[in-house]
Image: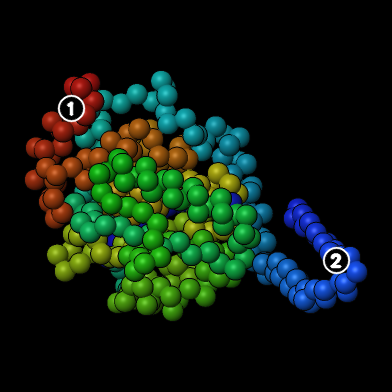
Amino acid sequence: MRLLPGRRVRAMAVLALTGLVACAPAPVPPPVAEPEPAPQAVPPPAAPKPSAASAEARARYARVQSDLLAQGLLRTDGGGTDAPFTDRMLADNFIRIALYDEYAPSGGALVQQTTVSRLRRWEQPVRIGLTFGASVPADRRATDTARVASYLARLSRITGHPIRLSDANPNFLLYIVNEDERRALGPVVRAALPGLSPGEVAGITQMDPNTYCLVYALSGSDGATYTRAFAVIRSEHPDLMRLSCLHEELAQGLGLANDSPQARPSIFNDDEEFALLTPMDEYMLRMLYDPTLRPGMTEAEVRPIVYPLAARMLGGAS
């Protein structure tokens, strides 16, 4: 198991017909059934009023987004000409992000500590089950659902791996919930990822305010092939932070587990410079699911493969 945290007129016509026959009584028309009244649309239940904690979180993250944007962060341009990278930089960053873990178990919980790992990824199709808390209004759900579906299609094209939204036996659960709903997720998390320690469950239910979103990924008996994942996005986030969390956690849940200050342009960097998946990130995802690599490989096994692989991808731009 790995913790991979990160930082929206009817119209009706009536025809009346009358018939008369000369010198004879007019036939009595059969009774006309009264039309059934049209059923009235039942409005969806109103979202529950947020608690003081949720309202405070919404205000907090609105300030955070405003401050980050004022500093020129949360960029959506993918890097442009001011953040060039070579094939060697790409391969180096892939090794740092795919072959190391950002968190390590300690005393039944997970603490931030970079540790050597092995290559991990999904081998079975990834089926994302998207669940919203009752606090998320219908229009916001529709926007988020469309964005997730579009992004998953993009991730599937990049990796060549089947990834899609599905309510049929999902193996990657994505929850978009507010403060109060997240605190009540304990039983859901334990059922989805059995074997988590109380401290690991508390990583979600008692998420630190400075953690914007997170994903847990569970590997199978080989310790390298993902079989289940559980991601949580705060519904209090303003639009761009919410989309940024979706981009990062879904991509990290595919196997790019670590963050690195050297990775630029990349969302796998805690500096918040980039909000959305960048061209470098796309290349790293392609590398992760390249058939020349396999789950469980060590850094020593990966190194001889990824440098020529990165050179082929970028046309030898060392």
**Residue 105 at x, y percent in the picture:** 29, 66
Question: Disc 2 marks which amino acid?
Answer: Val
Task: Decide: few, some or many residues near mark 1? Use Cα within 10 Å; few <14, some 14-19, many ≥20.
Answer: some
* Residue drawn 40% across the image and 57% down it: 165
Residue tagged 2:
21
**Residue 278 at x, y percent in the picture:** 39, 35
The answer to which of marks 1 and 2 sits earlier in the sequence is: 2
Is residue 211 visible to us here? no
Residue tagged 1:
311
Q: How many marks?
A: 2
In the image, residue 166 above or below residue 247: below
Using the rendered view, name the quadrant where residue 290 is placed. top left
* Residue drawn 36% across the image and 73% down it: 192
Per the rendering, the mark at residue 159 is none
* Residue drawn 62% across the image and 65% down it: 135
Question: Disc 1 marks which amino acid?
Answer: Ala
Q: Left or right: 243 with respect to 236?
A: left
**Residue 235 at x, y percent in the picture:** 57, 58
Q: Left or right: 86 with respect to 35?
A: left
Q: In this rendering, which labeled residue sits more in front, label 1 or label 2?
A: 2
Q: Measure the C-alpha gap from mark 1 to mark 2.
A: 94 Å
